[in-house]
Amino acid sequence: MLKLAFLLIGPASFRAHWAAISVLGAYLILLAVILAANVVPAFADIAAALLGLAFAAYGAGALAAALAARRRGAGGFAWLLPAASVLMGLLLLLAPFQSDLALGWLLAILFLTDAIGRLVPALVGKFRGWRLHVAIGAAEILLAAMLILDWPLPRSLDIPFCVGAFIGLGGWLLLRLGFMLRDLEEEAAILMLPIFAGRGWYEHAPILADGDTPPERSEAPLRVRVWTPRGCAADTGRMPIVDRYFGAVNPDGSISTGHSSLELAPDVYISHYPVEERTRSRDHFLHALSAGQENDAPGIFQPSYAVEVASWVEADQEVRFHSYNARRLRAFWVGYRQDSLYNVVNRNCSTVIAGALDAALEGVLATPHPWRRLAGLLLNPDLWLAGLMRVRAESATWTPGFLLDYAVPLARLVDRPDLSWAQRFGWFLSRFRRTLGDAADAAAVADSAPEVVRAAE
């Protein structure tokens, strides 16, 4: 979440504050050590309560947004991660009223679930940096074992240790980010920093030698189109979650993985596709998910949306952005299209769209008051929802489903950044009521929602 917030605000707003960012990170690390050691038990209780309240509040807001998007057909199973956030928040809030054993088991289940979500894609995909994700997953398994076995720490220290670890990781990120911003050249994109470089998706991040111009709201929309696996498969049987984010099985046994593209008329159309599409059967699906060179293939860049529709079908989802930096987008595209190599895991249709979208949105929320903007973003459930999608994609890969669930909250963030809290609360409330099926409230939806359009029924 922090990386996404700094990306949207941009390095220019924070460059003069690099020392404050690093000092804040150092203080958070010190606080984390104090909490983990339970030096002052009251501090740990207060920190756990505040963190639990934050998780529950942010998760509830993101859950309302995800369920509302799902009701429109654009949200898929993005509600699972906010729901887990709400559960984590409630566990922390109710810690004083629960037995240490029950709480330890519940936290262990959450850690194990996240560990599996990291380990399986990393071990199957073997993408660049997969060993780091395996190490993180292994650490989560060890932490879960510690919570269950009551060793080497007693259960009374479980909550302080977990809270301290969470705060310490955030502090470490800020400490590193401050020094990186100090050394980042003015013409370089923030995406070129090492904290964004793990998967190699931003190797073509723009460098603007003659300066940059602030992005402005444009009437010409930046369109992200998505062919979801279930939406473009023919008469497929339902496989919840799998057919939303990974692939849907056609009647002939082949697997449809969907597609995504980005368009900024009149001169930018980004759509990366293999020259020869491989037929993926159920038996060979796992092998096809490897990022190894055996799955590299020559690729092509489709010339236009009309050409794609003529040769296939229309996209079933579309998200429009009106606030973006067209120059950064074009610079990214000029660099990326020099190499047409296609890899289904690490250089596919969705990884390029996610990279192009991040390049276009860098600094879109730039402001003379970056700390105020940062606080507002961190209190915005849409940032958490989009950030959670980034985390899932980085531990596996960008798929059309992940990209769609990333773009929807991101459009709300960048196109309506100054929405008042009263308006935001009213919007979430109306969306949540609609999700529960209250048709009488349909007319009360605020126009602050992003433009999510069903391109094909």
Image (cartoon, rainbow, N blue to C red):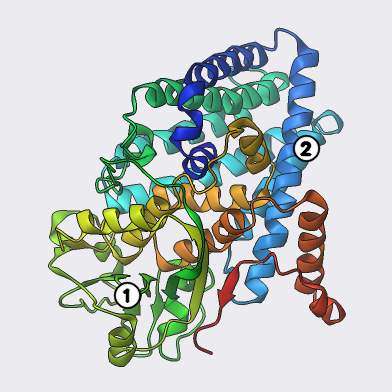
Q: Position of residue 179 (x, y in %)?
A: 41, 20
> Looking at the picture, which amino acid does disc 1 mark?
Arg
Residue at the spot 63% in from the left edge and 38% down from the top edge: 373
**Relative to 34, is 292 above or below?**
below
Q: Position of residue 140 (x, y in %)?
A: 50, 34
> Looking at the picture, which amino acid does disc 2 mark?
Leu
Which label number is shown at residue 282?
Answer: 1
Residue at the spot 21% in from the left edge and 77% down from the top edge: 277
Separation of marks 1 and 2 at Cα, in angstroms: 43 Å
Q: Residues within 10 Å of mark 1 (few under 14, many from 20)?
A: some
Residue 50 appears in which quarter of the rendering? top right
Which label number is shown at residue 319?
Answer: none
Residue at the spot 45% in from the left edge and 22% down from the top edge: 178
Q: Residues within 10 Å of mark 2 (few under 14, many from 20)?
A: some
Q: Position of residue 128 (x, y in %)?
A: 26, 44
Q: Quadrant of the C terminus?
A: bottom right
Q: Is residue 323 left or right of residue 128?
A: right
Q: Is residue 337 left or right of residue 4?
A: left
Q: Is residue 77 left or right of residue 117?
A: right
**Relative to 256, is 1 above or below?**
above
Q: Position of residue 399 (x, y in %)?
A: 40, 64
Residue at the spot 33% in from the left edge and 74% down from the top edge: 266
Q: Quadrant of the N terminus?
A: top right
User: Label 2, on which residue?
Assistant: 53
- Which residue is at the front of the view, 118 or 28? 28
Q: Is residue 455 left or right of residue 94?
A: left
Describe the element under mark 1 as helix, strand or loop.
loop
Which mark lies nearer to you, 1 or 2?
2
